């Protein structure tokens, strides 16, 4: 356990987590049937640098928050998986620039990934976990969910929409830093979409405001703002080392305690703040 101070931690995240996206050339030739549809350029080359970004968790504590206007005032907004904005604009806003999805969303039939409007008109980024030591070739032989065919179909139907896939090692590079900054052994499972999305925005933006990842005083057992399903594991984690993820980003908070209590808001500086 080698706990880092906040600036060191920022630099560790910058230098040890390689948050780049897959290209066809990263994969074996046998993957060409779907990898030929991957974007040719890395996400960073296309998106460039943004100033102030918001990350909106899917937490039930957003319900009744009236944070929508504040969230929409950011230059870019990242949301997760199937979290909607329609009918929840007052609390969560309506702008969606990025949507980070896990491979279940792409593959499970009940998500209707190909048809659902919720995934259109934004930049999509997908992740799928690999075993800790696996390289890209091993992961490609045995992904957690077989996303190849739905990915290919989606790209053919929506060729102009940017749709990136994260390199699977990224997840474990981030996991290592969460483990090093935790007082005990954490689950050997990848970090949640929440942490991955925050880190992605810290790579792209000068400043990142995250909403209801660290829960406000509205904290509730309600899992999501958009449906009445109750399970405290959504907020504290079961499969994902979520509570430890939250403590890592809490260390980096530049905002006030009041912002956390009232808005569930933490303010993080972009990784560019770590020089060089
Ligand atoms: O639930 P999920 O995440 O989609 O939530 C997105 C991110 O918001 C943060 N969160 C959510 C609820 C809550 N009460 N507090 C929170 O802090 C978390 O950081 C979370 O990552 C995932 O991480 O991808 C996850 O995805 C779901 C599910 O696959 C998708 O919603 C698609 O249906 C997982 N649930 C199940 O597999 C049943 C969840 O464990 C993690």
Image: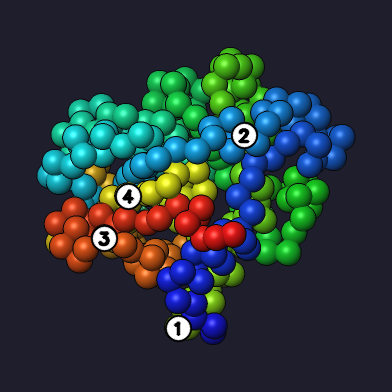
Distance, label 3 to label 2, CA atoms, is 30 Å
Task: For residue 238, say whether it is visible.
Answer: no
Left or right of 160: which side holds 247? Answer: left
Earlier-in-chain disc, 4 versus 2 = 2
Q: Position of residue 25 (x, y in %)?
A: 81, 37
Q: Ligand 1 within 8 A of label 4's CB?
A: no
The Cα–Cα distance between marks 3 and 1, rounded to whole angstroms, is 24 Å
**Closest to the observer, 166 or 154:** 166
On screen, residue 237 above or below 96: below
The residue pinned by badge 3 equals 255
Residue 45 got which mark?
2
- In the rendered structure, which disc, 3 or 2, sits on the residue that comes first in sequence? 2
> What colouring method underlies this structural image?
rainbow
Taking the spot 40% from the left edge, 40% from the top edge, the residue there is 51
Q: Which mark is residue 183?
A: 1
> What is the x, y in percent for residue 256?
21, 63
Which-is-in-front pick, marks 1 and 4? Answer: 4
Alpha-carbon distance for marks 4 and 3?
A: 9 Å
Q: Which mark is residue 209?
A: 4
Question: Residue, x 26% and y 34% (percent of image)?
Answer: 73
Residue contact at pointers 4 and 3, CB within 8 angstroms: yes
Question: Callout 1: few (<14), some (14-19), or many (20+) C-alpha neighbours within 10 Å?
Answer: few
Q: Secondary structure at mark 2?
A: helix
Task: Please tell me how crowded label 4 is: few (under 14), some (14-19), or many (20+) other residues with Cα within 10 Å.
Answer: many
Q: Quick one: label 3 or label 1, which is nearer the N terminus?
A: 1
């Amino acid at each position: 356990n080698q706990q880092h101070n906040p600036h060191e931690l920022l630099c560790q995240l910058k230098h040890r987590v390689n948050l780049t996206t897959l290209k066809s050339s990263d994969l074996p030739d046998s993957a060409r049937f779907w990898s030929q549809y991957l974007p040719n350029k890395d996400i960073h080359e296309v998106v460039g640098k943004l100033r102030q970004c918001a990350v909106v968790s899917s937490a039930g504590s957003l319900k009744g928050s009236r944070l929508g206007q504040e969230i929409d005032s950011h230059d870019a907004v990242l949301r997760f998986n199937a979290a909607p904005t329609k009918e929840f604009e007052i609390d969560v806003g309506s702008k969606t620039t990025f949507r980070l999805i896990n491979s279940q969303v792409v593959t499970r039939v009940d998500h209707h990934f190909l048809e659902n409007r919720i995934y259109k008109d934004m930049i999509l980024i997908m992740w799928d976990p690999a075993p800790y030591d696996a390289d890209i070739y091993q992961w490609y032989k045995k992904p957690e969910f077989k996303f190849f065919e739905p990915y290919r179909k989606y790209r053919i139907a929506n060729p102009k929409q940017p749709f990136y896939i994260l390199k699977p090692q990224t997840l474990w590079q981030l996991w290592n830093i969460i483990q090093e900054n935790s007082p005990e052994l954490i689950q050997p499972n990848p970090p949640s979409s929440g942490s991955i999305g925050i880190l992605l925005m810290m790579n792209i933006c000068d400043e990142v405001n995250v909403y209801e990842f660290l829960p406000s005083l509205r904290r509730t057992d309600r899992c999501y703002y958009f449906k009445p399903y109750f399970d405290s594991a959504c907020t504290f984690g079961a499969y994902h080392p979520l509570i430890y993820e939250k403590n890592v980003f809490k260390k980096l908070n530049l905002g006030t305690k009041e912002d956390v209590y009232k808005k569930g808001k933490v303010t993080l500086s972009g990784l560019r703040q770590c020089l060089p």
